[in-house]
Image (cartoon, rainbow, N blue to C red):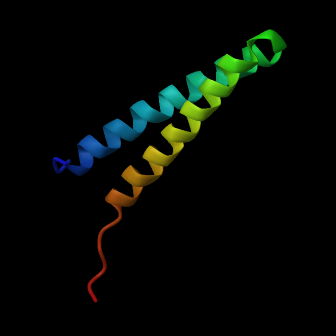
Amino acid sequence: METMMPAEISQRIAELRAEHRRLDERIAQLAANPDDDLEAKRLKRRKLQLKDCITRLESMLIPDEPA
């Protein structure tokens, strides 16, 4: 895996958060139509993947503490 600079990590986090918000909006729209349950489940799964990725990237921004 290539090493990312903190600015690149921050940019990627911002992109993932934007996608996460878009998924939230789409899931809310689908909630009004129970016929799209499968798509809603797929989007929720993607949303969880994004959250995990955001968390990993945020942890990369935390400097290591000396022992």
| Residue 33 in sight | no
User: Residue at position x 49%, y 47% from top?
Assistant: 52
Q: Which residue sits furthest bottom?
A: 67
| Residue 13 in sight | yes
User: Residue at position x 59%, y 24% from top?
Assistant: 23
Q: Quadrant of the C terminus?
A: bottom left
Image quarter for residue 13? top left
Q: Which residue sits furthest left?
A: 2
User: Residue at position x 39%, y 59% from top?
Assistant: 59
User: How many numbered callouts?
Assistant: 0
62 on left or right of 22: left
Percent across and percent down for residue 25 are 66, 20
Q: Is residue 24 above or below residue 54?
A: above
53 on left or right of 60: right
11 on left or right of 58: left
- Frontmost residue, 2 versus 61: 2
- Frontmost residue, 10 versus 33: 33
Percent across and percent down for residue 36 are 74, 12
Percent across and percent down for residue 42 are 61, 25
Percent across and percent down for residue 60 are 33, 58
Image quarter for residue 9? top left
30 on left or right of 5: right
Q: Is residue 41 above or below residue 64?
A: above
Q: Is residue 7 above or below residue 66?
A: above
User: Residue at position x 17%, y 51% from top?
Assistant: 3
